[in-house]
Amino acid sequence: MARFGKGDALTGTRQSDGSYIPAMQLVDGNGNATSNQTYTLASNATITATTGTTPVTGVQGGSYIWDVQFTGTSVTLQALGSDGVTWRDVATRTSSGTTGVVIGQGASVRLYNPNNAALTGVYSNLS
């Protein structure tokens, strides 16, 4: 693992364990730079037990920081599988925070509450 000294530039997002998820420049299929996208998954939402949020579709593929804040037991980020029916778990958080994730081109994503009680005050985005 690389060590950085005083004065070294490091761009990206620092996680709760002190590690960094490096910032990446997104490129299209022709190698041209594209703008970073932010997708809002929830804004002060309540997610009832064992249900998911309305999917966000057409997500640009790449590396993202999944940021989530909530009151409850756990929340899962899911992506729709290639069969167009099955939701697959990408990452799960048991407390508010950030997690690095990789999302495929054109994906549909949602938040899912796997618990037997509602999640409240849910704010979440991919950026």
Image (cartoon, rainbow, N blue to C red):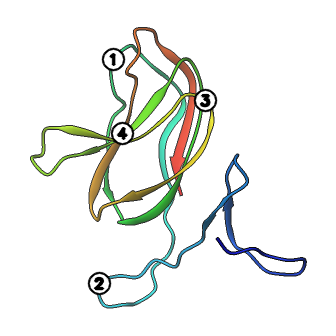
Q: Quadrant of the N terminus?
A: bottom right
If you read the primary sequence from the N terminus, does the residue marked by circle 1 or circle 2 appear first?
2
If you read the primary sequence from the N terminus, does the residue marked by circle 3 or circle 1 appear first?
1
- Residue drawn at x 32%, y 21% as measured from the top left: 51
* Residue 101 image point, x, y percent: 45, 54
* Residue 29 image point, x, y percent: 29, 84
Label 4: few (<14), some (14–19) or many (≥20) C-alpha neighbours in 10 Å? many
Label 1: few (<14), some (14–19) or many (≥20) C-alpha neighbours in 10 Å? few
Mark 3 or mark 4, whichever is nearer to me: 3
* Residue 118 image point, x, y percent: 47, 13
Residue on which the image places disc 1: 50
- Examine the image and state in which quarter residue 112 appears: top left
Position of residue 49 relative to residue 39, above or below, is: above
What amino acid is at disc 1?
A: Thr
Gap between marks 1 and 2 measured at Cα? 37 Å
- Residue drawn at x 50%, y 75% as measured from the top left: 35
Residue on which the image places disc 4: 110
If you read the primary sequence from the N terminus, does the residue marked by circle 4 or circle 2 appear first?
2
Are the two marked residues, 3 and 4, in contact with CB atoms closer than 8 angstroms?
A: no
SS at circle 1: loop
User: In the rendered picture of this protein, how many numbered marks are placed on residues?
Assistant: 4
What amino acid is at disc 4?
A: Arg
Residue on which the image places disc 3: 95
